[in-house]
Image: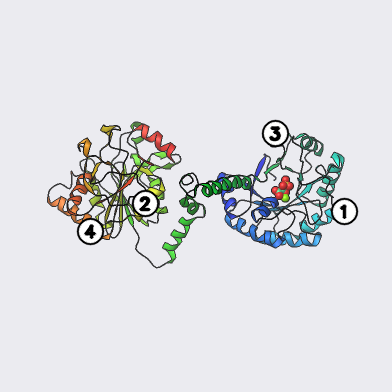
Amino acid sequence: MFSPNLSFLMEAHNGLSAKIVAEAGFAGLWASGLTISASLGLRDSNEASWTQVLAVLEYMADATDRPILVDGDTGYGNFNNVRRLVRKLCDYHIAGVCIEDKLFPKTNSFVGERQPLADIEEFCGRIKAGKDSQTDDDFVLVARVEALISGHGMDEALRRAEAYHTAGADAILIHSKLPNASEIVVFAKLWENRCPVVIVPTTYAATPTEIFRQAGISSIIWANHNLRSAISAMRETSRRIFTDQSLREVEGRVTSVQEIFQLVGNAELEAAERRYLPGKATARAVILAASGGDLGELTRDRPKCMIDIRGQPLLQRLVTALSNAGIREIGVVRGACKEAVTLKSIRTLDNDRYAETGEAYSLSRAADMIEGETVVVYGDVLFRDYILSGLLESQGDIVLTVDALRGQNSEPDRIRDLVSADRRFSGNYLDDRPVHLQSMGADLPAAAVTGEWIGLARFSAQGSRWLAEELVLLEEDGLLESADLPLLLTRLAAKYPVAVHYITAHWLDVDTLTDLANARNFT
Ligand code: SPV
Ligand code: MG
């Protein structure tokens, strides 16, 4: 409110929308009376009691640390109601309240004409009482002038603004329902910035923001656009599902359940569980990140897993994906430029012979982590969250995620981990018959290829025992140093069932600069 720059307050009406507003970057929130009422299924006519509104505000204040300006309507009565309201808002660490010079029960400003205004002296009493009741020195009281909306003209608006400012209001909200900003701009000019001016350009939405900036407006409230966008989206989804009697068209277009988990902070709860709950077995992950990669200047002082992908190293994105899926212990096998591989919450293991050894040898550096359920993943892959959850939920002691659309004819020289399984991807939603690996490698005959391994595998406790044994056997055969994972997995498939979990796209690995560009667009 007091910053020299134009500020923006975005509407929110519950805890979730408060989080979304903060996530978008807004410095402050507008807790709209209209949208809180509407989200409760009520009219903007004080149908929700003030304590019911307070309950919503408590969720909002808990959901974000950004300042919230509350639409306090008329203050829910006279000066005495305003006193209790302000004290309670301060208790909840709400940053400020806006009260409007109308009568309780209020009516939304866009309903009808010439709504009766409060007596100026009486409204000044509400302002004084509010300011005298704040228990937080920084609490802001905004007085909202409805004179223009009610058809009383500019002189009356200025007279009221002056009186409210003198009574102690920290800022003036001048409301207008014209389809253009003319009266707002005139008001701001005549007001001469005696205190900050706040506006709500709902009806004059087309006005360029620059006009408000030039007019010296302090803060703009985007008053109801989150609820309105939610209504459009919910209507479309409900109608679609009702008509189709199926989720087919809707799934993939709506926010994923994983994103809900992320918004409400499931990761924090998982971290807290690790701290406070007695330990319970969960999967571990080993990330193979020993090879440096060859992306020119970018890999001069760091391995490719540490290349920045929109503000985060590729490896961080992978670690976050694994953590979000509930994997607690994550080991990273480093090699090239190992000092550059420093992330919080990973355990580092080193393959110092990375230049002359292969993936199996790197994996063997993490031998003590291959116990219980274990995920093994290459350090240069990115995939949508559902791919990992699908793998973790899959059946089988050894399961590989395989892209059924790759490996036939796309860039054959780049594809190494070609897969030959006993059944091809059928694309049939109802087909859940198991598919098993037969062999894997770079040189399978084209006709035998059923996909490409994306570099992500899960081993159950039993599968981990088999994997650990096979690493020992490779060493006995003198192959540990040279073997890659396709060889290791092919050997396992000769002895045990190695299940194939088909996917189609939504992942990538970073080998070339083109891959890197794709990765930067992927997130
Ligand atoms: C609200 O968002 O509830 C407001 C702004 O008070 S308006 O709907 O424009 O009155
Ligand atoms: Mg309102």
- Mark 4 or mark 2, which has the lower sequence index? 2
Q: Report whether the residue tagged 1 is closer than 8 Å to ligand 2.
A: no
Q: Residue at x 47, y 49 (%)?
A: 247
Is residue 90 among the parts visible in the rendering? no
Q: Quadrant of residue 93?
A: bottom right
- Mark 1 or mark 4, which has the lower sequence index? 1
From this viewpoint, which residue is outermost toward the bottom?
A: 278
Q: Quadrant of residue 94?
A: bottom right
Is residue 253 among the parts visible in the rendering? yes
- Mark 4 or mark 3, which has the lower sequence index? 3
List the residue tagged with mark 2. 390
Q: Quadrant of residue 193?
A: top right
Q: Position of residue 172 (x, y in %)?
A: 77, 46
Going by the numbered disc 2, the residue's amino acid type is Gly
Identify the mark at residue 121; answer none if there is no mark: 1
Identify the mark at residue 207; answer none if there is no mark: 3
Identify the mark at residue 465; answer none if there is no mark: 4
Nearest-to-viewer mark from 1 and 3:
3
Query: Element under label 3?
Result: loop
Q: CA distance from mark 3 to mark 2?
A: 48 Å
- Mark 3 or mark 2, which has the lower sequence index? 3
Q: Report the side of 37 relative to 332 (left or right).
A: right
Could you tell me if the residues under marks 1 and 4 are in contact, i.e. CB atoms within 8 Å?
A: no
Q: Position of residue 148 (x, y in %)?
A: 81, 42
Nearest-to-viewer mark from 1 and 4:
4
Q: CA distance from mark 1 to mark 4?
A: 82 Å
Query: Element under label 2?
Result: helix
Colour mode of the rendering: rainbow
